[in-house]
Image (cartoon, rainbow, N blue to C red):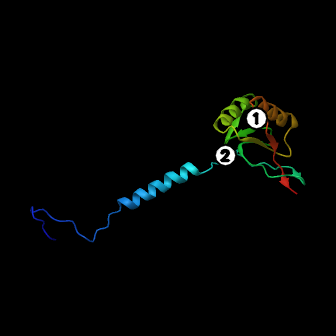
Amino acid sequence: MRRNKRGGQEDNPSEIDLTPMLDVVFIMLIFFIVTASFIKEAGVEVNRPDASTSTKKENVNILIAVTATNEIWIDKRRVDKRAVRSVVERMHAENPKGAVVIQADKASNTETVTAVIDASRSAGVYDVSLATEDS
């Protein structure tokens, strides 16, 4: 190792400074976090009914699942029928352009599905759809 004029040791010239590379990696990480679209899952799998006229829905940010036992799941949490409206209002406030898609099981009760649709519309979301399987 060489000594500089003041008597201290000089850094080894073969060392690589990783600071700029780490800065770039953190900036890229921040960029991907900010631009990523987070898909919210309902939390359970349901057997959706078949439909031959189904179309793909854009701008979906609220997925509501109704199981065969008429349990309501939103964002991987079981929700009581009376609390659906407040949960939809909160999620709709996060993304006002989003829509509601209900994933109802084939064996679910139409009364439960209708209650979820009514709660969504009373929360101010009028773009409510029912998810189906392509036949």
Question: Is 118 on the left or on the right of 14, as rendered?
Answer: right
Q: Secondary structure at mark 1?
A: loop
Q: Secondary structure at mark 2?
A: loop
Q: Residues within 10 Å of mark 2 (few under 14, many from 20)?
A: some
Q: Which mark is residue 125?
A: 1
Residue 124 location, quadrant: top right
Residue at x 17%, y 65% (from the top left corner): 10
Counting labels gives: 2
Residue type (three-letter) at the residue carrying disc 1: Val
Which of these two is toward me, 25 or 69? Answer: 25
| Residue 83: image location, x then y, percent | 71, 29
Which image quarter is the N terminus in?
bottom left
Residue at x 86%, y 52% (from the top left corner): 54
Dot 2 or dot 1, earlier in sequence:
2
Q: Which mark is residue 35?
A: none
Residue type (three-letter) at the residue carrying disc 2: Lys
Q: Which residue is mark 2?
A: 40
